[in-house]
Image (cartoon, rainbow, N blue to C red):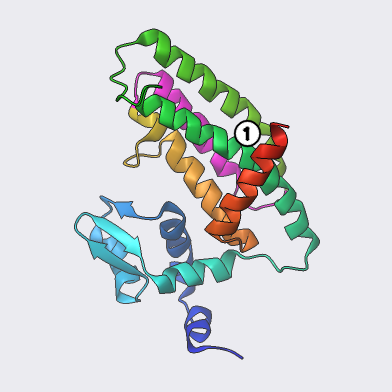
Amino acid sequence: MHSAAAERTDALDKTLTDAVIDLVLRGMWRGVPEAQYRPLVDAGLAMVKGPMVLPTEYAKNAAAKMLRIPADSELKDRINAVYEAFLPVNRKVREVCTAWQCRPDGSVNDHNDSVYDAEVREMLEDVHEAIQPVLRRLERLLAGSGRYLTGLEEALDQFDDGGPQWLASPLCDSYHTVWMRLHQELLLVLGISRADDEALEEKLVRRSRG
């Protein structure tokens, strides 16, 4: 049975598809010109809340339908293997971002302790080394996914050039922001819910730690 929502997705203006996918993967736009987001708002794909442009449920459903790979395809199995390699590293990047923002005692990291910050940078280096082969595998399978490794490396360069916001700030294409878009695309491509994602990550992390 073909629902009314599905029919609306099928009828989506092809000129809007790239914008819809970008907005859904990012989770929000901030500071973009009205000329960029107005067509999405008019089509029911976006809503404006203060300085932010957010995707509607219609946009999320449309993006999921456009990105999802057929369940019975060999390609899905191969991407799923990459996704399972990604998840344990995903846990590590969250730990790095937490360590950058908060010290082990729970206090805010004011970045006055250069030794501690250098230790966090070493943790980030371990994450970056671990994710590179995963993303190179993904690049051979998923069109356009090479932009994620490029984005992570650009954020890392900005961070090393003295921009602390380039690790975890949501207001720029920081390392964490690019990482979140990668994660979201994998979920949409594979049709995996956040709940299933979290459960599988926990299982794989436990397995990796023996």
Relative side of 135 to 118, left or right: right
SS assignment at label 1: helix
Q: Toward the viewer: 180 or 10?
A: 180
x then y, percent, for residue 111 = 31, 17
Relative side of 9 to 114, left or right: right
Task: Give above or below for 173 relative to 42.
Answer: above
x then y, percent, for residue 103 = 37, 22
* Residue furthest to the right: 74
Q: Residue at x 40, y 55 (%)?
A: 27
Q: Residue at x 67, y 45 (%)?
A: 203
| Mark count | 1
Relative side of 52 to 65, left or right: left
Give the quadrant of the N terminus. Answer: bottom right
x then y, percent, for residue 2 = 58, 89
Crowd tier of the residue under label 1, counting other residues whose Cα lies within 10 Å: few below 14, some 14–19, many 20 or above:
many
Q: Residue 168 falls in which quadrant of the image?
A: top left
Highlighted range, magenta: 141-164
Q: Residue at x 55, y 58 (%)?
A: 195
Q: Amino acid at mark 1?
A: Ile
Per the picture, the main secondary structure of the magenta-coloured stretch is helix
Q: Toward the viewer: 81 or 51?
A: 81
Task: Give above or below for 74 relative to 82.
Answer: below
Location of mark 1 (residue): 131
Task: Give above or below for 88 relative to 17.
Answer: above
Q: Is residue 149 visible?
A: no
